[in-house]
Amino acid sequence: MNAAEKENLNEIDTAIVKVGKKEYEKFKKIPTELFKEINISSSKAQAAWEEAKTQNDFNVFKPHLEKVVELTKKMADYLGYEENRYDALLDLYEPGLKTSELKKVIEPLREFLVDYLAKLEKGEKPDNSIMKRYFPIEKQKELSLRALKLMKYDFDAGRMDVAMHPFTTTIGVHDVRITTRYNEKDLNDSLYSTIHEGGHALYEQGIPEEFSGLPIGDGASMAIHESQSRFWENIIGRSLEFWNYFYKDLVDIFPEFRENTPEEIFRAVNFVERSFIRTEADEVTYNLHIMLRFEIEEALINDRIKVEDLPEIWNKKMKEYLGIVPEKDSEGVLQDVHWAHGSFGYFPSYMLGNLYSAQFYKKMKEDMPMLDKEISEGNFESALNWLRENIHSKGKIYEPGELVKMVTGEPLNPKYFMEYIENKFNKVYKL
Ligand code: CO
């Protein structure tokens, strides 16, 4: 062992102690009674939420959500914070990130996205109906498996199954399983769920085996995890370069696509739409859905608004950011389960994942000028190796903010995402 290796080992040891201690002390602060109360209230709230959503009646959910919010505020107070009560919750998902920093990222991004969305309307709309024909499930499965193979997902250390809401489960570094879902009338659904979960799985499969079972044997944060899935799903999987290569697999399985060019497919899978449902949103509108939720929950946790006002505030923000207002709360404030779970502070992870992935991609391209060419040749190895070396191999040694700075040379900066969006969607909408 040389000096550098020794130093590296010391760094890892220090991280194990630091991460382990932080986690232990965090939860030690919360009284067992409160934990119990949160668990009971949130399971009741989830049942009420389901009923409220089915009946399209926010009032069914309201008293339960009030209870969950009250307990969450208590928990945040036990966890402690310096500037903002929401910091205590944010830290559970994105360690080290402050609400004030998040707001600074969101402001320019929101302005950009609202303007850009309007600009896209002057462009040429892609024909996305080509992805919404009838596609037999067996054939969709074949296409998804080919995409996973291309990504170098390790099938000897995993498998793919079906689930309503796809997810990734890690049983160990040698067994990382993913699930996908199928919609006979939409090819995007299974293909992109698979690639997304494949991205999560590659991260898990790339965390060093010697970290397993230790506090550092995990992804750096929810958002860094999401940056990996979004990188593969959107930056790679929805790129023209990807379709220039994958087109041959597509027409091999679905010959009807011979009538379309790779470019038409690239444009179809990047169709942008002002829509009500977050989980169905495209890359341009997605972060607006998240900002709206973040602003609501941060105000709620800091007592600036009340639960009873949520439907109205929700609709007002939808109008402001996306220009549309849902007719039913089931398509608005009641659409997500997160608040019933008591998962306040979770939503920003999705947005941060998008932003981190664009910042990583920018650096990756600087390090590897041939990257786009390699992708268009179906060679994803250097992209994966870059992620392995810079992100996966680090496990949870560093807080996400430290990791991003270490990998890209600067803290989280939304400008890379904005550049990425503009560059890509100007092509999609021929602007
Ligand atoms: Co994900």
Image (cartoon, grey):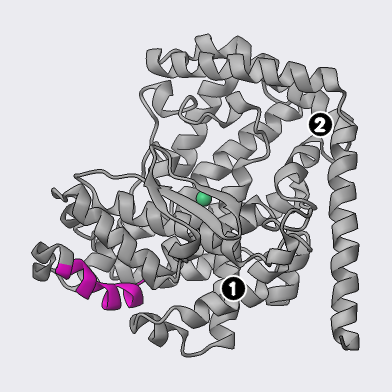
Residue 302, position in %: x, y?
76, 29
Three-letter amino acid code of the residue under disc 2? Ala
138, 51: nearer the viewer: 138
The residue carrying mark 1 is: 387
Q: Which residue is mark 2?
A: 76
- Of callouts 1 and 2, which one flags the residue occurring earlier in the amino acid sequence? 2
x and y, in percent, of residue 9 in the image: 86, 73
Front residue of this view, candidates 397 and 223:
397
Q: Residue at x 13, y 69 (%)?
A: 260
Horizontally, is 72 left or right of 273 in the view? Answer: right
Residue drawn at 38 percent across, 22 percent down: 328
Q: Which residues are magenta?
A: 239-252
Front in this rendered view, residue 302 or 389: 389
Q: Is residue 217 above or below residue 275?
A: below
| Image height of 79 relative to 360, above or below | above
Dot 2, crowdedness within 10 Å: few (<14), some or many (≥20)? some
